[in-house]
């Protein structure tokens, strides 16, 4: 299993200004190669403290590519629903060139109602916009002189520059939450899948659906599964929980607040059951996340046990993307955790 780091801004200017937040992320990115982490990842969200500091993940990953010379750069995930595919494909080509071919492209459908409202996009167009947008981006990356007549975007004889450094294009990932159709669709299409244990559920069953769909479609290998987790490592178990609990609990509160519209309006055709998902998240705590595999917190020995147990429960996954400076956790505290995890946890999972 490989372990990378994820930067998910979960704060606003009332907590920490954006220039300080991203400077701290780059400070931690400086350590990634030397400490043996495999990737650097960030998200796309808008308009709220939950993720809103990162409206374009390609920008931060370009800066991170200058700090880490070996780690992969992962968008986790870009939202085709709110972007023109021509622009996304061009940004991908540019970052792939600047990084020397180290980009992994993750795409998601988005799930925060306020983003749809402000962008003026219907929630019930989510799946159609995502499917069309991702297919158009793939075509633009793989081919020149592309013509596509879509429901939402159309173009004729378009060649996007720069052309991707990786051939035929960077690896593609699909973000999935709880919907089995999303896992099945990613496997059938031959895309890697990124998910989060945050809501709990049967991740082993979802991963199996993905692997089976991959195999049934006759793709080589078995695909790649990346799961995201909060991580805080301290020599003392009780101290680790004492330090990590407040910012993780604030993170859990912020995701519920950001998605609270689901509790008022119920689900939509493209998001069945999301009202129940958010209601369930409102009951989550740091401890419950540890039990479900959404957070690895404790001493190195305890975290090793947590990871091995969760790996066994899921039937195995390929990469863990670790949130290391979640919410307002001080950068020096995150750095010590990152170093300790590298020294005493990573060796237990080395090939």
Image (spheres, rainbow, N blue to C red):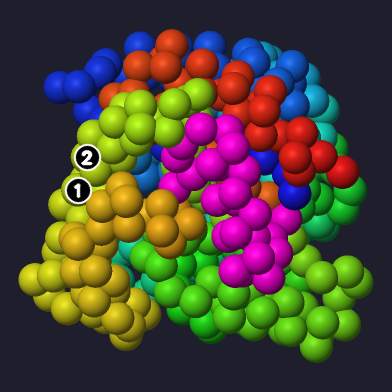
Compared to 133, does 6 lie above or below?
above
Compared to 185, does 296 lie above or below?
above
Compared to 117, does 15 lie above or below?
above
Q: Quadrant of the C terminus?
A: top right
Q: Which residues are magenta?
A: 295-318
For this view, does 45 lie left or right of residue 145?
A: left
Q: Main secondary structure of the magenta part?
A: helix
Compared to 175, does 188 lie above or below?
below
Q: Secondary structure at mark 1?
A: helix
x and y percentages locating residue 142 in the rendered image: 81, 56
**Location of residue 329 by image quarter:** top left
Closer to us: 191 or 128: 191
Closer to us: 141 or 349: 349
Inspect the magenta stretch and tell me whether residue 73 lies in it.
Answer: no
Closer to us: 139 or 253: 253
* Label of residue 250 in the image: 2
The answer, for residue 233, to whether it is visible in the render is yes
Identify residue for label 1.
Answer: 253
Give yes or no for contact between labels 1 and 2 (Cβ–Cβ under 8 Å).
Answer: yes
Q: Residue at x 43, y 74 (%)?
A: 201
For this view, does 73 lie left or right of residue 269?
A: right
Measure how far apart labels 1 and 2 are at the Cα level: 5 Å
Badge 1 crowding class, 10 Å Cα cut-off, few under 14, some 14 to 19, many 20 or more, is some
**Location of residue 297 by image quarter:** top left
Q: Residue at x 52, y 82 (%)?
A: 180
Q: Secondary structure at mark 2?
A: helix
Closer to us: 197 or 90: 197
x and y percentages locating residue 272 in the rendered image: 32, 83
The answer, for residue 19, to whether it is visible in the render is no
**Location of residue 11 by image quarter:** top left
For this view, does 183 lie left or right of residue 177?
A: right
Inspect the magenta stretch and tell me whether residue 306 lies in it.
Answer: yes
């Amino acid at each position: 299993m490989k372990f990378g780091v994820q930067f998910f801004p979960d704060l606003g200017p009332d907590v920490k200004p954006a220039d300080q937040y991203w400077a701290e992320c780059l400070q931690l990115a400086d350590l990634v190669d030397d400490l043996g982490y495999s990737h650097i990842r960030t998200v796309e969200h808008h308009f709220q403290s939950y993720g809103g500091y990162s409206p374009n993940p390609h920008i931060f990953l370009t800066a991170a590519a200058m700090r880490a010379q070996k780690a992969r750069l992962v968008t986790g995930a870009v939202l085709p629903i709110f972007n023109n595919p021509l622009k996304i494909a061009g940004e991908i080509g540019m970052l792939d060139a600047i990084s020397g071919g180290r980009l992994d492209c993750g795409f998601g459908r988005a799930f925060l109602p306020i983003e749809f409202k402000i962008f003026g996009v219907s929630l019930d167009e989510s799946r159609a916009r995502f499917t069309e947008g991702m297919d158009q981006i793939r075509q633009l990356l793989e081919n020149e002189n592309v013509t596509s007549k879509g429901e939402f975007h159309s173009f004729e004889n378009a060649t996007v520059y720069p052309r991707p450094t990786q051939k035929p294009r960077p690896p593609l990932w699909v973000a999935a939450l709880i919907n089995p159709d999303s896992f099945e669709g990613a496997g059938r299409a031959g895309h890697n899948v990124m998910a989060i244990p945050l809501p709990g559920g049967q991740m082993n069953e979802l991963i199996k659906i993905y692997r089976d769909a991959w195999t049934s479609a006759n793709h080589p290998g078995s695909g790649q599964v990346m799961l995201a987790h909060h991580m805080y490592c301290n020599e003392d178990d009780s101290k680790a929980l004492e330090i990590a609990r407040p910012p993780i609990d604030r993170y859990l509160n912020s995701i519920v607040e950001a998605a609270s519209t689901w509790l008022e309006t119920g689900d939509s055709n493209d998001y069945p059951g999301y009202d129940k998902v958010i209601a369930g998240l409102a009951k989550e705590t740091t401890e419950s996340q540890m039990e479900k595999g959404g957070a690895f917190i404790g001493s190195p020995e305890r975290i090793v046990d947590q990871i091995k147990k969760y790996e066994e429960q899921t039937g195995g996954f390929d990469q863990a993307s670790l949130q290391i400076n979640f919410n307002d956790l001080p950068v020096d505290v995150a750095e010590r955790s990152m170093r300790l995890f590298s020294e005493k946890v990573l060796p237990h999972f080395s090939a």
